[in-house]
Amino acid sequence: MVKIAVIQASAIPFEPQKTVAKAIEILSRVSQKGAQLAVFPEAFLGGYPKGVKFGSVVGNRSDEGRNLYQKYVEGAVEINGDEIASLIEASTTYNTIIVMGIIEKLGRTLYCTSITLEPQKGLTGFHRKLMPTGQERLIWGFGDGSTIPVTSTAVGKIGTVICWENYMPALRQAMYAQHVELYCTPTADDRPTWINSMVHIALEGRVFVISACQAIKLNEYPTEFIEQYELNANVNDYIMHGGSVVISPLGEILAGPVYDQETEIYVDLDLSILEASNLDFDVNGHYSRPDIFTLNVNSKPQKSVIFD
């Protein structure tokens, strides 16, 4: 058995050091309950800027939008920065594997990234979102195939697919081909329809799906953000409702979804179900037709400038 904790909590947007302190407090709590793996939501470090357009319309950007974007950049973290170092130390202290969504700064580009941290080992995996959705493309860069490998850990093979990347069939197939067992989906999608997709993926890949989403109110964002918020909500309203859930390889909802509250969801996973579930369906094995369908994955890092 593997005991996991799904963290449905609010970030402290644009304040990564404060968010790290909150995460460490959560880790202390979940470790006391025996959790071996803690999965946090998308953009937990840095924040998910739902409801703002950073002063952008086709053909024009406003000074107010640029100023808010500057604040967002300042709240991003670097992979080798102090915030990640603190989380690596906490992973070892509390003997807990961490999967967490972050807003990563690399040079002058931001990425929506998920990191995997292991006790004693540190950063053993990270994935940059391949396809930002809609307005996300204005503020985040595109990841490449070098960050999609599955990570082998003491609790199983962990893969991460972020939010609407899960609607990319080829990416899902690439994850299944790496024999992912714990399929983590840090997300910002809190709609009831998201659960249907998670059930489908669990059945399709015969994997445990672990979906984590923030539950956060508008008043938890900084004033500059609230002033540019454009969706219909009062300051005391949840603008991300949670809906975190855990699903078995046979499509059974094991825990959740939970809405409109911060919480941790604990589940004991029996990994022997993984192989047993392949009796009648193995998307990468006996139920595939490589004589008809093949998928080529470019796993090389991509660079816009190469110096010889």
Image (cartoon, rainbow, N blue to C red):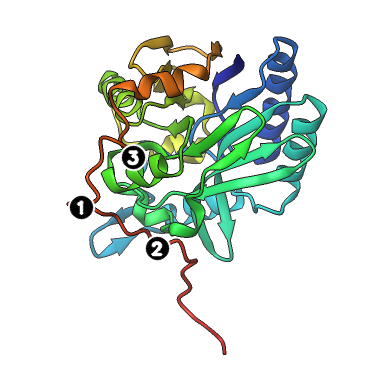
Res 247 → quadrant: top left
Residue 178 vs 261, above or below: the answer is below
| Of marks 2 and 3, the one in the foreground | 3
| Of marks 1 and 2, the one in the foreground | 1
Q: Position of residue 285 (x, y in %)?
A: 33, 38
Quadrant location, the C terminus = bottom right
Quadrant location, the N terminus = top right
Residue on which disc 1 sits: 291
Residue on which disc 2 sits: 298
For the point 48% across and 39% down, which residue is it? Answer: 160
Horizontal side, residue 292 vs residue 183: left or right: left
Give the Cα distance between marks 1 and 2: 20 Å
Q: Amino acid at mark 2?
A: Asn
Residue on which disc 3 sits: 284
Residue 287 vs 199, above or below: the answer is below
Give the Cα distance between marks 1 and 3: 13 Å
Q: Amino acid at mark 1?
A: Asp
Mark 1 surroundings within 10 Å by alpha-carbon count, few (fewer than 14), some (14 through 19), many (20 or more): few
For the point 72% across and 52% down, which residue is it? Answer: 81
Q: Is residue 134 visible?
A: no
